[in-house]
Image (tube, coloured by chain):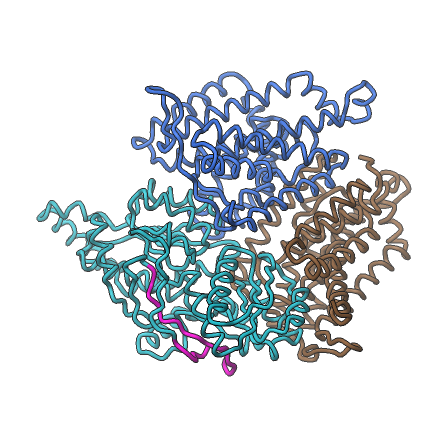
Chain colours: A blue, B cyan, C brown
Amino acid sequence: MTRWPAVVIGAALVLAPLGVGRLYSAYYLNLLTWILIFALFAAGLDLALGFGGLVSFGHAGFFGIGAYAAALALRHVAFSLWAALALAIAAAALLAVVVGYFAIHSRGVYMAMLTFAFAQLLYEVAIKWVAVTGGSDGLPGAGRPRVGWGALALDLSDKRHMYWLALGFVALGFWLARRIVVSPFGQALIAVRESEERARAIGIDVTRHRRVALVFSGALAGLAGGLFAIYQNFVSPELLFFALSGEVVVIALLGGMGTLYGSLVGAVIAIGLREILSTYTDNWLVVLGALYVACVMCFPQGLTRLFARAT
Amino acid sequence: MNRRRFITTTTAAGLGAALFPRAARGADPIKIGVLLPFSKAFAVLGENTFAGFMLGAKEAGPTIAGRSYTIIKEDDTADPSVGVSKVRKLIDRDEVDVIVGTIHSGVAAAIRNPIVDAKKLWLNPIATNDLLAEQGCSRYHFRFSNSAWQSAAPLGPWAKAKLGDRAYICVFNFAFGQQSAAHFKRAFTEAGGTVVGESFPPFNNTNYAPYFPAIKDAKPQFVFANFAGSDAVAFIKQYADFGLKGPIKVIGPSNLVSEDVLSAQGDAAIGVYSNSYYTPSYDIPKNRAFVKLCKDAGKEPDHFLCAGYDAAQALFGALRETKGDVENKERLIQIITDMRIDSPRGALRFDPKNHNPISDIHLRTVQAGPLRHVVIDVLKDVRHPDMGCVL
Amino acid sequence: MSLDAILTQLLMGLTVGVNLVLVATGLTLVFGMMGVINFAHSALFMLGAYAALMVSRHLGGFWLGLAVAPPVIALLGAAVERWLLRPLRERYPLSHLLPLLLTFGLSLFFEGSAKVLWGADIVSLDRPARLAGAVALGRITFPTYWLFALAAAAVLAAGVWLVVERTSLGLSIRAATQDPVMAAVLGVDTQRLNTVVFALGSGLAAAAGVILGAMTSLSPQMGAGIVLDAFIAIVIGGLGSFTGAIVGSLLLGQVQSFGVALLPAFHTPLVFLVMAVVLVLRPSGLFGAAERR
């Protein structure tokens, strides 16, 4: 991404909360928080899918397990942001290790179906294990913790503070993803995606790279899930459902696979568009579907590349 | 609203604003937010509830004590995350004074905190969560239909007396299904009955046949079933197909054979017992008028329409009493708590302990010619029991 | 479990399984030939049911609906392939994910359109009176309509099998599934074949929609569950393999049927477990070709 647009957008994102109450209502900040968290989620997916060539139709499993882990941590372990997020990342990473163990030898759609199966299994557990997860009615949050010390403390019940926290973690997540991609590991991963045989021929351990990529990807998705649980102060099994997995694949695709920052564009479109459309018409599904089709037929490279060409 | 009305109203409002500065603040329209599912699986239920609410609004007229109102409707798609976001929109951006919603109990659980924290009046037409009448109850919340407890537990003693003492429970594996099964089981066994088996088919299941052999083998006298929407249609149709309907009766909450699914179920539903606070064939003057009102508007009356209509009656009735003042929430809450609403279901009043309706529960069976529910028994004044609600 | 119960569960599983074959065939052939996961398949299933409903309401009769709906939806499928999928794949032949996004958008569009056209109400497709009641089959009774559903789907599936295995069209399809480039070199018009296969798959899904729709109910979301089952079936059977689709579907039908009876608390995960086990032992499914992309 070229320099100036990035700086402008970055500045706008940082300054966004200051306009609340004066320029626009808190609702837009809330929506933007949701979009940012999902952009992180989709960036995690992009790491596996766009850079690693690993097809996952079950990424909601990582997101959802992170969300539940955070919610349960706040309730039962410690009313602390760091505990919640640490457990969210750990749970998701652990799940990624397990899924990787089973799925890594499968290709393409087979892998997609296995990842989907894992996520659905977790969904079933969430629905059945009512005592722990609250079942299909969901689990109300234990509240939003305070972060920091003294004058630098963030009260996460304040929507602006929650936004800044999310922005901070999302920026961190994107930065980490970027570092992974440009590192030797990341380059090897791209090589594996391009041609497994050639990568093996030059000595790259294909299976290990894939597994590690999945773990990074899952961890990022888990972080997003943990943030979402705190942001919403509520978790429900929908966060594990395959419809969410599909939605995040769409977000990654809309923005352009393999661009990372495209996830932000994709999230703005997928989530923002749906929110706005559904306010104006009950038949937003038709319009959204038609728009997706039009997007694919007209801008198949994803909209980030469209912007990249323009700047 | 025609132009002359509009001009008259606005002039009156303007004059009023000039003459009564304190009331001038109230010259802005009252904002009513409606949060219901209008797409995906629950769409028809959301549409019906909204239609009922609008029928009530139309009866109340375009203004309340001289003050106009706007209704802002949002689609929660029966997804808690969307519900929370839309409620934020209604509260923060649209600055609504009242929220009317919703249907899916997960959404209701999720939006409880944002609404209560913002101290908005919350009229809940349908969502059945027991939570909202127990630990999660709130003075701002009023429910216009029965809780999961009310729709299942009273059936226990009734079924033991009228249907037999061996029951099989078959419900969908979601909160409402699980909760209703637990309540029925407890009440039925306390009344002396035996539950001979249970099964929990998943939500959104189309094939119930594999569950039937187990039901047959357990030899119950009846089945307590709870399914909704397409699942209810598939279950009832297949239950009849496989010949269980005659020997083993079926009883369940209203959604099992509610009007939105009854026509699709057709003859397969004949003889099925259900319970509801509202039955279209219940012959009281208010209901006859309501049925006509619905049919003139092109809608078949059902309990969703009734709940929406009653929510409107409660809201506009309360606003009339406060002369359009919507700021003083405590007063509104007190008025509604004390209100006796002339509802198509009969008399509607709220339990001051948990803001759940004190319901007369109709026990009905489906009869043919034309296909409809016929009330065969009424359990009066059923209250959701005291289970930790502190208002 | 009594013998009666076992026989009944077997028949139930067979009915579900055979109809699943109809849905799965389209999915697996389209994937095999074009590498496309067709997310719009559930919508085609649903539209088939609604088309039959329209015919039944305005022209009269379930049979007419069953006869008319599949060809109509087959044409719709052909149109989608010819004017949306083909141009996209010609521009980006290496992308698997773009057609995915396209079919995903289409599924939303079709589902939303169904709601616009027919409303959100749950409606019923009336079954012919002649198929009401139950039939005695030795020791057990089985609903007549279910038997019809089993027989009709079996006949259709057999018809497709004949076409795929015994005709030159079928030979071209099998060749193109194994190696599209080679088939094209040898003179197979793969472009036209793609359209034909897409249409065939759509028509079969529509037929299943009519048959199963009359057993349950119609709503814009009705296709989601069965297409998911079909995906699992073709993954188990091996993507691209018609035989795999048959085996996977029949297996899945029985697993679901007996799973409910034998492991009531775990039958939903059971299906995934079966899929996982098959994939661990044979990563490309039972009859799937080894990875060549």
How many labels, in total? 0
Q: In which quadrant is the C terminus of chain C drawn?
A: top right
Compared to C145, does B60 lie above or below? above
Region in magenta: B356-378
Question: Which quadrant is the N terminus of chain C positioned in?
Answer: bottom right
Which residue in the rendered view is the most extreme toward the bottom? B369
User: How far across and down, in percent of the image, does residue B30 sit?
Assistant: 25, 51
Residue drawn 68% across the image and 69% down it: B213
Toward which corner of the image does residue C131 lie, by quadrant?
A: bottom right
Does A6 appear above or below A25?
above
- Tell whether A275 sits left or right of A57: left
Q: Residue furthest left?
A: B19
* Quarter of the rendering containing residue B383: bottom left
Residue B367 part of the magenta segment: yes
Vertically, is A162 above or below B377? Answer: above
The answer to whether C252 appears left or right of A78 in the picture is: right
Image height of B316 relative to B252, above or below: above
The answer, for residue C124, to whether it is visible in the render is yes
Residue C56, given in percent of the width and then of the height, sits at 63, 71
Q: Residue at x 68, y 60 (%)?
A: C260
Q: Nearer the viewer, residue A209 or A45?
A: A209
Q: Residue at x 66, y 47 (%)?
A: C39
Q: Residue C133 location in percent, x, y?
A: 68, 79
- The question of residue C31 being in magenta is answered with no
Image point (45%, 54%), residue name: B105
Instruction: Between residue A309 and residue A209, name the one nearer to us.
Output: A209
